[in-house]
Image (cartoon, rainbow, N blue to C red):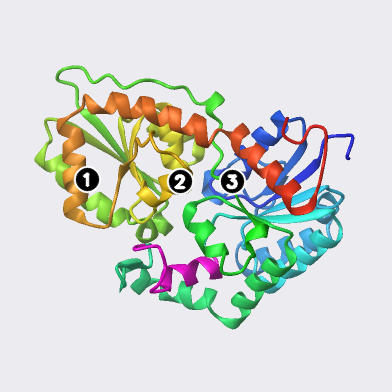
């Protein structure tokens, strides 16, 4: 047994995932360091800054040298546990990522990975005609989406021999994988044996998020919100959601208003979330992701992934507050019109949404899953593990 807190390195970050997970791990008494680039435009908190100091190839080379041989490299060693933010945990080419992976694995006690972003396994799952996923950003009912057509280069790249080999190498050499979404849990089963897979979920720091029940007064407009990163517009289905939301705004202008933002730092983005009533999140997900869960913690009604398969996966029979969005413009329109014309429904959805996040995604709950997963994978044991 380790008679001290674990020393943990969370390497890389996506949408503030690792930074929020660190809050939960620290609540158990562990010593946690987050190393990331702050998810670029989001500028999230980190203890070790992995942002590129220069643009282009020169910036990548400089970052790699710093992580492999320079001052940063000396801050990436000596940990009990290292958790990677997906296979693309730093913005570098696969051959450079592999060398960093090998160094980190060699110079620390245990190395794990979180499945939380696109990789070879996820692409394979989305393109498999026998997949349990009826739709994704790549295909809907077997037909390519606009994103699949326009960004086919991304799919080809992940399915190429170099990237496929790199992802398989990580799967073979990481001691286990913790999954963030139902979709990723499905996809990693293509590469990891079941005993090396545990579900973690997305951590949300509910203690730092104020819950404010929605109470629409007579004559008050329903505030609709849609925010997205511009470079991921098609991936999130935002172009279709925007089209429908603008049509609803036009048809029911006396009942609603629409706030649209893109590429905001996290602090500003949260303020827009806080000022809204209904958050229109993303189109192709079976599962609510970070934006939807933050909004639910605030007491907002969200339109996002809320498929029956997801609720069954997390064993949730009662709390189902999410307005499930499917890739059908007429269905999206009808769902949004229903909310705009029945504002009294927003209050109970908001209350149940907060309960849902506290039950399934509070950062301490997710951190506990991580700690138990790491123990399961390796028999790590510590007094402060997940008490």
Per the image, the residue denoted by label 2 is 289
Q: Mark 2 or mark 3: which is in front?
A: 3
Residue 6, relative to residue 305: is it above or below? above
Looking at the image, do the residues carrying marks 1 and 2 touch, with CB atoms under 8 Å apart? Answer: no
Say which residue appears at 44% left-offset and 27% top-offset: 355
**Element assignment for label 1:** helix
Q: Quadrant of residue 352?
A: top left
User: Counting other residues with Cα less than 10 Å from the Cα at mark 1, is it few (<14), some (14-19), or many (20 or more)?
Assistant: many
Q: CA distance from mark 3 to mark 1?
A: 32 Å
Q: Nearer the viewer, residue 102 or 312?
A: 312
Which one is earlier in the sequence, the residue at label 1 or at label 2? 1
**Element assignment for label 2:** loop
Per the image, the residue denoted by label 3 is 200
Q: Quadrant of residue 371?
A: top right
Say which residue appears at 74% left-offset and 59% top-offset: 175
Magenta-colored span: 119-135
Relative placement, left or right, of 233 versus 358 is left
Which quadrant does the C terminus fall into? Answer: top right
């Amino acid at each position: 047994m380790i008679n001290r807190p674990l020393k943990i390195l969370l390497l890389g970050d996506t949408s503030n995932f690792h930074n929020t997970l660190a809050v939960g791990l620290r609540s158990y008494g562990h010593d946690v360091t987050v190393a990331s680039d702050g998810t670029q435009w989001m500028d999230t908190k980190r203890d070790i800054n992995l942002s590129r100091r220069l643009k282009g190839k020169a910036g990548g080379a400089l970052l790699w040298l710093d992580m492999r041989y320079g001052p940063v490299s000396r801050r990436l060693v000596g940990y009990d546990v290292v958790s990677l933010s997906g296979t693309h945990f730093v913005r570098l080419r696969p051959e450079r990522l592999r060398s960093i992976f090998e160094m980190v694995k060699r110079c620390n006690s245990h190395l794990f990975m979180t499945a939380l972003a696109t990789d070879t396994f996820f692409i394979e799952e989305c393109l498999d005609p026998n997949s349990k996923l009826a739709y994704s950003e790549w295909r809907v009912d077997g037909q390519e989406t606009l994103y699949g057509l326009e960004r086919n280069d991304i799919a080809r790249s992940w399915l190429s021999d170099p990237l496929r080999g790199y992802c398989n190498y990580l799967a073979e050499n990481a001691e286990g994988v913790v999954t963030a979404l139902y979709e990723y849990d499905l996809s990693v089963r293509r590469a990891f044996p079941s005993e090396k897979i545990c579900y973690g979920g997305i951590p949300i720091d509910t203690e730092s998020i104020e819950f404010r029940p929605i109470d629409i007064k007579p004559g008050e407009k329903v505030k609709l919100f849609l925010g997205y990163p511009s470079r991921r517009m098609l991936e999130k289905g935002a172009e279709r959601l925007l089209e429908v939301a603008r049509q609803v705004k036009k048809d029911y202008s006396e009942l609603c208003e629409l706030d649209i933002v893109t590429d905001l730092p996290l602090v500003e983005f949260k303020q827009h979330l806080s000022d809204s009533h209904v958050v229109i999140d993303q189109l192709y997900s079976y599962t609510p992701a970070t934006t939807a869960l933050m909004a639910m913690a605030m007491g907002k009604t969200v339109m996002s992934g809320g498929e029956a398969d997801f609720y069954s996966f997390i064993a949730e029979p009662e709390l189902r507050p999410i307005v499930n969005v499917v890739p059908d413009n007429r269905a999206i329109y009808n769902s949004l019109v229903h909310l705009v014309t029945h504002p009294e429904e927003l209050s109970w959805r908001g209350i149940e949404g907060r309960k849902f996040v506290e039950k399934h995604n509070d950062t301490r709950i997710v951190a506990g899953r991580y700690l138990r997963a790491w123990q399961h994978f390796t028999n790590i044991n510590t007094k402060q593990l997940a008490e």
